[in-house]
Amino acid sequence: MHPLARFRRGHLHLTRLEAFSDAVFAIVVTLLVLELKLPPLKDHASVSELAHQLVEIAPKFLGWLISFIIVCKFWLNHHHVLNLASHADYGLAWLNSLFLMGQSFIPFPTAMMGEYPTNPLAVSIFGVVFAVNTLLFIALQRYIVRNLIKPELASAQDPHALIKAMVGPASYLVGAAAAWVSVHAALVIYLLTPLFYITPPEWHGKMQPGADAKKP
Amino acid sequence: MHPLARFRRGHLHLTRLEAFSDAVFAIVVTLLVLELKLPPLKDHASVSELAHQLVEIAPKFLGWLISFIIVCKFWLNHHHVLNLASHADYGLAWLNSLFLMGQSFIPFPTAMMGEYPTNPLAVSIFGVVFAVNTLLFIALQRYIVRNLIKPELASAQDPHALIKAMVGPASYLVGAAAAWVSVHAALVIYLLTPLFYITPPEWHGKMQPGADAKKP
Amino acid sequence: MHPLARFRRGHLHLTRLEAFSDAVFAIVVTLLVLELKLPPLKDHASVSELAHQLVEIAPKFLGWLISFIIVCKFWLNHHHVLNLASHADYGLAWLNSLFLMGQSFIPFPTAMMGEYPTNPLAVSIFGVVFAVNTLLFIALQRYIVRNLIKPELASAQDPHALIKAMVGPASYLVGAAAAWVSVHAALVIYLLTPLFYITPPEWHGKMQPGADAKKP
Amino acid sequence: MHPLARFRRGHLHLTRLEAFSDAVFAIVVTLLVLELKLPPLKDHASVSELAHQLVEIAPKFLGWLISFIIVCKFWLNHHHVLNLASHADYGLAWLNSLFLMGQSFIPFPTAMMGEYPTNPLAVSIFGVVFAVNTLLFIALQRYIVRNLIKPELASAQDPHALIKAMVGPASYLVGAAAAWVSVHAALVIYLLTPLFYITPPEWHGKMQPGADAKKP
C-alpha cells in the first residue's frame, strides 16, 4: 500500500470540518484585539497623554486591520473551496489542520510588527507568514480539485488557476523583500494584496444554486 | 462591468456566515472578562484590602456590563436581519466581516474606559466606537433590504426604517459629546441607548414561522 | 400594550441560540486555563524550584477544576432545558444572554480565589457568583416552562421543580457563608454542590426520542 | 437503582456535543499562540537583536507545533469515534467533558515546557498530560463501543483495539521518563507519537457512507 494511501480513506462530515475551521477563523480575528494594548498613563485623566499614546500605537491598529481583512479573505475563499468538495477524507482533514495552524499563527507576526514597525525583520516576517498561509491554502485547494471535487464540477477547471493563485504568495514575498528597503512600501503591498482576492475566482461550471444556502 | 459587480456574485451558505458571526460575538463577550483584573494585594488574606480593590475597579465592571449588553443586542438584531435575506453574496460577506471587525474591536475601548474612567477622551471614544458599530450594522441591514430580501418580505419595508435606525448612532454620539462635560452623563446615555433597540423592530410583513425554528 | 409584551414577540432559531451559547460555554471553560500561570523561576532548569511553584499554585488548579465541572454541568442542563422549548422569543433570548453574562463572568472569581485562597472574601464571592448563576438558570428554565414549552410536555411539569432547583443556590450560599469560618469547608461545599445536579432532572413526560439526536 | 444508572439516561443531540467539542478544540489550538511572546527588545529597530530573540524562543515554537498537531489528531479521532455512536447519554456527555477538560489544560504544560525547555520536570509533565489525555479519549471510545454503538457496527469491533490504543499513552510515558535523561530524546518521542495515530483505525464494518457528509 502506498504510504500516503491511508490519507485517502475516511469519510468525514464537511459540516464538522467547517465548524472547526469557522471557530478557528473567528478566534484568530478576535484575539488580534488583545494585542492592542495601551502603555500605562502617568496622569489617568490627561487627554493629551492618552491621545499621544493612541497615536504611538497606530502601527498596531494598522497591523490589526491588515490581518483582520486577510483572515476574512481566507475565510471567504475557504468557504468557496470546501463547497467544491463532495466529501472530506483524512488527507483533506490534515491539509485543513495545517492551513488552520498557519491561520492561528497570524496573531504572533501581527503583534511583532505592531510592536516593532521600524524593524525590517519584523515587517518582513509578517509578509512571509502570509505567503506561507496562501501556499497552504493553495495546497488545500489543489487537493480538493484533484481528489474530492464534485463530479458535476470536474469538467470546469480553469487550467491557469494555479498560476493565477501564485500571484498572492509572490506579492506577499515582494512585500517581505521591500521591507528591507522601506517598511512603508511593504505595508502598502500587504494592504493591497488581499484586494486581488477579495472575491473567490468565478468557477466556470455549474455551481449548486441556493438550494443549500439556507439551513432547512 | 461595474467595479462593484463582483460583490453581487457568490451564493454562500447563510449557515456558515451565521456560524462565523456567532463565534465572533461569543468570543467578544467572553474576552471582555479578561480585562477585569485586580491589582496585586499586599496582604493576600486581607478582606478590607480586597474589598477596596474591588471598589476601585468598579468602572471596569460597568464597562463590561454595558459592552456585554450592547453586543448581545447586536447579536439579536443580527439574527433578525440575516433572517430577512434569501441568501448571501460576496457583498454581504464583506459587509458582515466589516461589521464583525467593529464588534471584535469593542474590548479595546471597553478596557480603555475601564482603566481611565475619568478621562473624557477614553469615555468619548467608547461612544464613538458604538456609533460606528451601529452604522456598520445599518449598512448591513440596508444591503440586505435592497439586494437580498426574501421575495415574500419585499413589500413590507418600513419607509421610515432608516431614520429610526439613525437614533442609535446619534444617541451614542450625544454620549460621546457629553463625556467632555461629564463622564457620568455619558455613561448613563451609553447604558440607556441599547434599551431602545432591545428587541428588533417589528417587520410589517409575513415572517416565515416556526418551521425552521428548530433544527430537524 | 404591556411593557414586557415586546419580549413575547420574535421567533428565533433555537439552533443559533444554541450555537451562540455553546461557543460562550466553550470559551469560558477554555479561558480558565489562562489563569494557571507560574511565577517566573530563578533557575530555569531547577526541578525542585519548579515542583515548589507547582505546589504553590495548587489552589489555582482546584479553582480551575471546580469551575470547569460547574460550567459543564450548566452546559448539560442548558441543553436539556432548551430541548423543552418549542421555539425562542425575545424574552428567552435576553434571559439566555443574562445567563451567559453570568457564565462569562466565572473566570474572574475563579482567578481571584486561585490567587487569594486564604482570603475569605475571595472564596465567598466565588460561591455567591455560582449562586447567582444558578438563579439565572432557574429564571431561564421557569420562562421556558411557563411560556414556550412544547405542547406535548405541558402536562408533565413537576410541581416541586422550583423548590428542588433552589437547593443549588442555597448550597452555594452556605458555602459562601462557610468561607468566613473556614475556606476549606467552603471549597468542599463548592465541589460537592454540582454533584447533585450532575444529570438533569427526569422529565415526567414523553420527550421526543432520538429522531433528532443526529443531524441528518 | 445502580448509582451509575442515572448516567445511562438522557438522549442528547450529538450535534450539540460536537459543536461544544469543536469550539473547545478550536479555542485550545488558537490560544496556544498567545504563549509565543517575545521578550522586549532594547533597540526596537535592531534586526540582529530580534533575530536573536526569535532563536531564543525556538522551544516555544516547537511546543506550539507539537501541541497543535496532537490536538488536531485528537479532533480527527474524536470525530471518528462520535460517528460510531447512535446517540449520546449523560455518561457520554460527562466523559466528553472530562476529555475536553484534559484538552483545555494543554496550553498550560505547553507554555511551561516552552518557557523551561531544559527543565526535566517541565518536559516530563508535558508527556504525562498527553498520556492522561489519551487515556481519557480511550475511556470515551470504550464507553461508546460498549453502550452506544450503532447496531449495524456492533459486530465489527476489533478485539485488539484496546491493546493497540494503549500504545499511545505508553509512548508518551516513555517520553516523560526519557526527559529525565535527555529532554531532546523526550521531544523526539512526543513528536513521533501522534504520527502513529494520524488517521483513525479502520473500522472493520460498514460505515454509513457520504449520505450525511454534507449538510443538506
Image (cartoon, coloured by chain):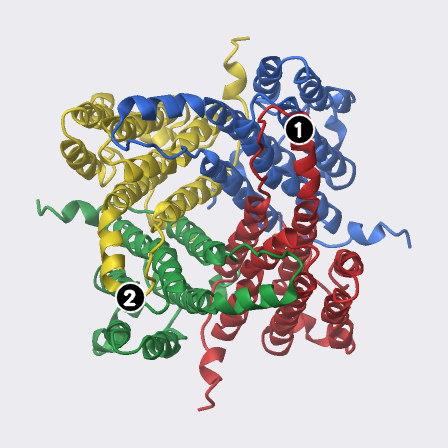
Chain colours: A green, B red, C blue, D yellow
Name the kind of residue labelled 2 in the image. Answer: Thr
Residue D4 vs residue C127, the one in the foreground: C127
Q: Residue at x 50, y 29 (%)?
A: C64
Query: Which quadrant holds the N terminus of chain D?
Result: top right
Look at the picture and state if B189 lies above or below D59: below
On the picture, is B16 further left or further right than C112?
A: left
Chain letter for the residue marked with disc 1 in the picture: C
- Compared with B26, D155 (above or below) is above
Residues behind callouts 2 and 1 on a single chain: no
Q: Residues within 10 Å of mark 2 (few under 14, many from 20)?
A: many
Q: Residue furthest left?
A: A1
Q: Which residue is mark 1?
A: C125
Q: Residues within 10 Å of mark 1 (few under 14, many from 20)?
A: many
Q: Report the residue at 62% width, 52% height from top.
A: B115
Check residue A134 in the rendering and tell me which mark sits there, or answer none: 2
Given the image, what chain letter belongs to the residue carrying mark 2?
A
- The residue located at (53%, 28%) in the rendering is C114
- The residue at the point 28 percent across, 35 percent down is D116
Q: Quadrant of residue B171?
A: bottom right
**x, y percentage for residue C43?**
28, 31
- Element at badge 1? helix
User: What is the residue that sits farthest to the right in this orientation?
Assistant: C1
Position of B90 with respect to B73 (left or right) is: left
Do the CB atoms of the residues marked 2 and 1 lie less than 8 Å apart? no
- Residue C178 is situated, as x and y percent measured from the top left of the image, at 68, 15
Per the image, label 2 sits on a secondary structure element best described as helix
Q: In the rendered image, is residue C86 in sight?
A: no
Q: Amino acid at mark 1?
A: Ile
Q: Where in the figure is residue C70, as x and y percent of width and height?
A: 57, 28
Is C136 situated above or below C167? Answer: below
